[in-house]
Image (cartoon, grey):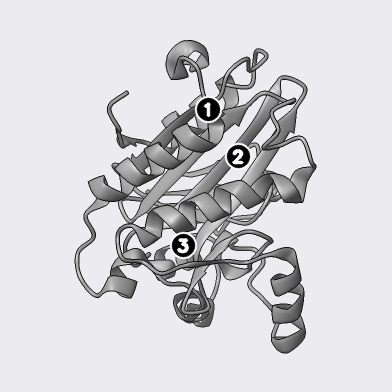
Amino acid sequence: MTPTLLTVSALVEQGWNDRVLLDPIVTPVWRLWTYAQPAVVLGLAQRGMQLPVRPDAVLPVMVRSSGGGAVLVGPWMLSISVALPVEHPLVSDGVVASYGWLGRGIAQALESVGVHAQVLSPEQLHARRADRPVPTLDWACFGDVSPWEVLAHERKLVGLAQIRRRNGVLLTAGILLRSCPWETLCERLGRSRSDAERLRQCTISCEEFVGTALQAQALVRSLHAMLGTECSPGDQGARAPE
C-alpha cells in the first residue's frame, strides 16, 4: 500500500474513528491524517464544557469518543488512528501497556527524520512528577503528559488517546509537525494568555527541534513501515470504513 497522508476535516477523522468500531475489527487498520482547517477537539469528559459566547467565533468545536484534554488540530499536526482486534497482543495487556508499542514506534519513526525523541515510561513519568510538582494544564492534551507519550528536550511532542470497545480497540496519536497557535485554542475555550504561553513552553514541534522545514512525507513513510511491522495486517483495507 502506498503511504498516504490524508488531508481532511476534523469531522471526517472523528467520523472514521467512530465508524471503525461499529463492527468487530478482524484485522488491524490505520489511517494517517492532517487537516485542511483548524478545529478544537474536546475529550469525551469535556462534552459539557461551557464555551465563551462569541458571535464571531468561526473555529469549530467537536467532541471525540476518547478521553483526555482538548486538542487544537490543524495543518501543524499529523494524527494517527489505529484500530486493532480486542485480542490483538498489542492491546491485550491493559490500557496503559497498550500505548507502549505505539509511543516507541512513533519515537523510532521520528528518529528517522532527525527528531531525537524519548518515550516516557510509567516509571519515568512518576519520577518526572515527583521532580516537577508544578500544576499542569490538564484541560489541554498537550498541557500534561501520560505514560508512553513522546517528548523531545523534555517537552511534549506526541499525545496519545484510546477507545476500548467490545468490537475492538482504537489508538490515536497526534504529532506536532510545526508550532501550534496555542493562543487560538485558549481564546476559543476562554483560557488566559498565560495558559497559551505555558503550553508553548511545555511543548515542542518537529520543525522546532530540527530547526528547519520537515519533510513530512519521509515521516509518513516511516510511520507506515512501523505500523505495518508492528500490527502485521493482512489486507489493510479490508475493515476500514470509507
Cα separation between marks 3 and 2: 23 Å
Q: CA distance from mark 1 to mark 2?
A: 16 Å
Residue 122 coordinates in the image, percent (x, y): 74, 65
- Residue 5 picture location, percent across and down: 31, 37
Q: Quarter of the image containing the N terminus?
A: top left
Relative to the observer, which residue lies in front, 52 or 87? Answer: 87
Along the horizontal axis of the image, is 216 left or right of 196?
A: left
Q: Amino acid at mark 2?
A: Leu
Does 239 sit above or below residue 58? above
Callout 3: helix, strand or loop? helix
**Which amino acid, mark 1?**
Ser
Q: Give the number of the mark in front: 1 or 3.
A: 1
> In the displayed structure, would residue 190 be above or below residue 126?
above
Viewer-nearest residue: 128 or 224: 224
Residue 232: numbered disc: 1
In the image, residue 221 above or below residue 31: below
Answer few, some or many: residues within 10 Å of disc 3's Cα (few below 14, many 20 plus, some between 14 and 19): many
At horizontal 31% and vertical 65% (from top left) the residue drawn is 114
Foreground: 203 or 65?
Answer: 203
x, y percent for residue 166: 77, 22
Secondary structure at badge 2 equals strand
Residue with the mark numbered 2: 171
Q: Give the vertical position of 170 relative to 61 (above or below).
A: above
Q: Are marks 3 and 2 in contact (CB under 8 Å)?
A: no
Q: Are marks 1 and 3 in contact (CB under 8 Å)?
A: no
Any part of residue 42 in sight: no
Query: Horizontal and vertical percent for residue 239?
Result: 52, 14
Give the residue pinned by disc 3. 185
